[in-house]
């Protein structure tokens, strides 16, 4: 078999939540280059349209479906709309999440509502989406679901209650989904990014928020630099393609060695909390 | 299964260690993705078979009969690859002998043999090839391990300790060489079909995807980790296991 052909996503339909900005848009572009048609879903329309334009520029079909993943009704509509317009779904990538929240609150200031929002966006949304799309995948007896967790899901972080708890939940949601859906030939895997510099893929307002933290994040990484969005996009490509057909329930870390050490200050890991560096 | 981005065109790969399961598929997958390979393993019909499988693809292959448990022979093998190809871009440690006995029944000689094949060989190859990669300021080391590098199993003392050692070596080298252009990762494996061994149906039922893996199915992950797009991925263990490790 000619190697260049294998692993290609020619004609596949892939939904990416949070596909308007950052890693989601990077994935959209790479996967489109490999031949996939892309559906992007998030709340803000403008960034979604921008990603869609980038996908079309690469010669593939793109569909924009404004969606809040914390609302099951909207999630179901996303699936219906995609099936209506694109005819099928091959892969669903749960990438939506809130990375840069508001200024962190101290433990005692976090309200029930804060807690719910943090868990809803970063964990419940992935559950609602996976539940909805897996029903279709199960009938079709094939499909791939990808979740996006974070290195934070494997470790603690001072004052980061909702994000770290929710992302840990995403890792185990991956396993439970994988075990439950294996019999329907559905593969479920989890991408675990470390610190990836998405500055260039953000709207201006977000760029301003990121500017002050960008310089310090690399100090936490053994490789001495932050990741590029493509590091994660190519991992997504690997997990979308038939290259990973015997792989399920796994997590795939790309983090510059961040999770590998962490027992001592190695010279790369300053003894400060990342949260305190946030604006 | 190689997308264009994962191709390892004209890179030099050294597959080290004799394994019933991994040596041939790792070599063939890398060659199909564009690499030239050398295979350093014990001089058995298996080495000849792996070499022949690669040769059939039309790419260059160098078979180096090596007692991988002898550090001096490993050094010589690595020197030979560099003499022949000029460099080593990818090292795959594929050594894997199976041995399961109750702890108190294991003889010293048996313990040492399993450690030698499954761990010390990888250690020697990382030393010798790592030196070369440091000179190049670039390299990919991929250690193939079992799920028993992370989990325990009854009667598995020496095997689990050897595999766990490879995993810890993977992590430490990843950190030591993080700023030097070398990534070090492990491919974790589950239950795979061996040509000369019947499939255990009870085990197959236990595997979430309900079948053993075919050894070829590790190839795509080996190639992915060997490729240029994984420079931010290091110190990791990634499984090809049909979901086994997701179990309680
Ligand atoms: N970049 C990193 O270093 C890093 C590290 C670890 C993990 N991650 C994870 O990677 C994923 C992408 O992050 P990123 O860095 O690319 O950040 P990002 O650019 O902020 O992307 C997050 C996306 O999620 C969308 N989103 C947020 N809430 C949503 C909701 N309720 N419904 C639908 N969409 C929603 C956002 O769009 P709208 O606001 O328009 O809805 C946004 O486009 C996240 O899950 C994040 O946790 C990133």
Image (spheres, grey):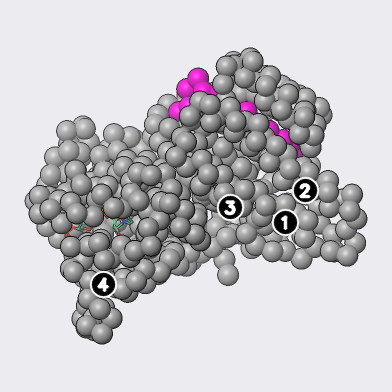
Ligand 1 in which quarter: bottom left
Which numbered dot is residue B241? 3
Percent across and percent down for residue A65 are 16, 55
Marks 2/3 in contact by CB < 8 Å: the verdict is no
The verdict on residue B14 being magenta is yes
Could you tell me which residue is drawn at 57 percent across and 49 percent down? B172
The rendered magenta stretch, by its main secondary structure, is classed as: loop
Q: Chain of mark 1?
A: B
Sooner in the amino-acid sequence: mark 1 or mark 2: 2
Distance, label 1 to label 3, CA atoms, is 20 Å
Q: Residue B89 versus residue B242: which sits nearer the camera?
A: B89
Q: Residue B79 versus residue B142: which sits nearer the camera?
A: B79
Which numbered dot is residue B115? 2
Is residue B160 in view?
yes
Q: Secondary structure at mark 4?
A: helix
Could you tell me which residue is drawn at 67 percent across and 21 percent down? B79
């Amino acid at each position: 078999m000619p190697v260049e052909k294998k692993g290609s996503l020619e004609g596949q339909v892939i939904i990416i939540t949070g596909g308007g900005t950052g890693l989601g848009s990077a994935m959209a572009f790479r996967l489109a280059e490999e031949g996939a048609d892309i559906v992007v879903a998030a709340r803000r329309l403008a960034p979604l349209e921008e990603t869609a334009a980038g996908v079309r520029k690469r010669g593939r079909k793109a569909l924009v479906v404004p969606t809040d993943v914390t609302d099951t009704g909207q999630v179901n509509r996303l699936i219906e709309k995609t099936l209506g317009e694109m005819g099928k779904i091959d892969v669903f990538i749960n990438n939506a999440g809130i990375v840069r929240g508001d200024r962190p609150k101290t433990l005692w200031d976090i309200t029930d509502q804060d807690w719910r929002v943090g868990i809803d966006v970063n964990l419940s949304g992935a559950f609602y989406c996976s539940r909805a799309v897996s029903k279709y995948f199960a009938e079709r007896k094939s499909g791939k679901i990808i979740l996006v967790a974070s290195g934070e899901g494997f470790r603690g972080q001072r004052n980061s209650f909702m994000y770290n708890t929710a992302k840990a939940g995403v890792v185990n949601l991956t396993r439970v989904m994988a075990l439950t859906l294996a019999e329907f030939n559905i593969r479920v895997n989890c991408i675990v990014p470390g610190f990836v510099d998405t500055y260039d893929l953000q709207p201006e307002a977000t760029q301003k928020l990121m500017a002050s933290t960008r310089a310090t994040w690399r100090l936490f990484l053994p490789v001495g630099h932050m990741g590029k969005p493509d590091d994660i996009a190519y991992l997504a490509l690997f997990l979308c393609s038939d290259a990973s057909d015997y792989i399920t329930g796994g997590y795939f870390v790309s983090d510059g060695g961040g999770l590998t050490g962490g027992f001592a200050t190695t010279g790369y890991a300053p003894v400060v909390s990342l949260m305190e560096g946030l604006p | 299964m190689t997308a264009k981005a994962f191709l390892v065109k004209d890179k030099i790969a050294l597959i080290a260690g004799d394994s019933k399961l991994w040596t041939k598929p790792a070599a063939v997958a890398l060659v199909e993705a564009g690499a030239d390979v050398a295979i350093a393993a014990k001089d058995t019909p298996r080495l000849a078979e792996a070499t022949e499988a690669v040769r059939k693809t039309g790419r260059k292959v160098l078979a180096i009969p090596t007692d991988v448990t002898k550090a001096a022979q490993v050094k010589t093998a690595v020197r030979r690859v560099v003499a022949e190809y000029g460099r080593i871009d990818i090292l795959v440690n594929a050594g894997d002998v199976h041995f399961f006995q109750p702890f108190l029944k294991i003889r010293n000689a048996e313990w040492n043999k399993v450690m030698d094949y499954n761990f010390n060989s990888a250690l020697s190859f990382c030393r010798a090839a790592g030196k070369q990669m440091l000179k190049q300021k670039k390299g990919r080391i991929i250690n193939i391990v079992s799920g028993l590098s992370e989990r325990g199993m009854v009667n598995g003392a020496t095997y689990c300790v050897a595999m766990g050692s490879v995993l810890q070596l993977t992590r430490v080298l990843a950190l030591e060489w993080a700023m030097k252009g070398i990534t070090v990762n492990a491919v974790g494996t589950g239950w795979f079909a061996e040509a000369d061994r019947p499939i255990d149906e009870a085990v197959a039922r236990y595997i979430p995807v309900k079948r053993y893996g075919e050894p070829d199915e590790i190839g795509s992950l080996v190639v992915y980790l060997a490729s240029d797009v994984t420079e931010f991925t290091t110190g990791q263990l990634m499984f090809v296991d049909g979901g086994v490790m997701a179990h309680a």
